[in-house]
Image (cartoon, rainbow, N blue to C red):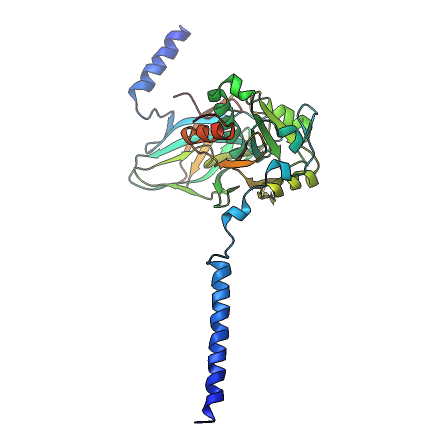
Amino acid sequence: MIRRRPALAWVAAAAAALAVALFAGWWQVDGPGARRPNDLRPLPLSAMQFSLTDDNGRAAGPHTLIGRPTMLFLGFTYCPDVCPTTLADISGWLEALGPAAAQRINAVFVTVDPERDNRRAMADYVAHFHPAIRGLTGPAVQIDRLVQGLRADYRKVPLEAGGYTMDHTASVFLFDAAGGFVTTIDAHEPREFALPKIRRAMGDPQ
Amino acid sequence: MIIFRQTAIAAVALLLPFAAIAETPDIAVDRPWARATIGAARPGAVYLRLRNDGAEAATVTALRTDVAAMAEIHRSSTTAEGVSSMAPAGPVTVEPGATVTLEPGGLHAMLMGLTAPLNEGDRFTLTIVFADGGEIQVPVPVLGVAARGPEE
């Protein structure tokens, strides 16, 4: 009897330690301590630092965007499908909002492929879409700062036939005039969902 | 005369719910279009619908065109994190009675190594090759860079 007590204590201690470890694991993975998607919300533009150039050669950074609501899309001009489709969507939304609203919002297309997309390439490309859309490019390190601030992602992928393509976050990011993140519009979201989101970013009554 | 002809074509198109512009006995293709490209260095994309009226599944195994060194069906897809990527779709099978749609943001025929820029208003031929050796020649009109598809 006397000899068994320390053994029981050991078992109890081990069980307690296991319970603590399991609880700690649960807390961090599934419980209240879990990383929520909210932790991955894009930063406000005011908390970002990046220095790019638009297709007209003007400097573009958080300070040039803040003051007006911003609609921002990442892509690349060698993108045959998703990027022109989304830029056509954005053009359609700007047309639906009307010329006055289109002048009150920044609509920017930022390349994640500065190797091929210089200022001239961006100018040639955005010329085919709504005139309010500006094309931004710059050094990769500056683009990376913006992409990290957006909690977005991109990756260069070699093509079997030669050359490469880019995987990239294809959501449209919306910021209010103060630079605060409002929401995203997913690729191919129907217009009836997209327009109210843009109006919300613009602070307009719904 | 030209106006008359266009009206006649429009009238025929209205009469047919699926106005096939190219077909084999079993496969009908309609609504083909390509997006114009800026220069010839960038890849092009072709969209269309394939409908299988036959009793057997039909599988697209290859694409050919004079305007590009290589043509292949690719699929754009988006992960739960919102990251979009593009990869060869492999052989695409159209089941009997089914329609497969190549449309923006999904399946598309990617044209790589263009021999010349695709300019709005151009027209070229895309040959679709099936597993049974059958082929369809599809005339493809080139629409604008910002087009979303042919007018309804």
Apparent side of residue B106 relative to residue A110 in the rendered image (left or right)? left
Q: Nearer the viewer, residue A191 or B115?
A: A191
Q: Please identify the quadrant where the N terminus of chain A is shown.
A: bottom left
Q: Residue at x 61, y 26 (%)?
A: A134
Apparent side of residue A145 relative to residue A92 in the rendered image (left or right)? right
Q: Please identify the quadrant where the C terminus of chain A is shown.
A: top left
Q: Residue at x 59, y 38 (%)?
A: A44
Q: Nearer the viewer, residue B65 or B89?
A: B89
Q: Give percent across and percent down for residue B15.
A: 29, 19
Q: Is residue A189 visible?
A: yes
Q: Residue at x 30, y 22 (%)?
A: B16
Q: Give percent across and percent down for residue A187.
A: 48, 35
Give residue A166's quadrant in the image. top right
Apparent side of residue B41 relative to residue B65 in the rendered image (left or right)? right
Q: Is residue A1 above or below residue A190?
A: below
Q: Is residue B22 above or below residue A25?
A: above
Q: Is residue A77 visible?
A: no
Q: Is residue B10 above or below residue A65?
A: above
Q: Residue at x 50, y 36 (%)?
A: A184
- Label count reads 0
Q: Give percent across and percent down for residue A124.
A: 63, 24
Q: Nearer the viewer, residue A176 or A157?
A: A176
Q: Give percent across and percent down for residue B115.
A: 60, 28
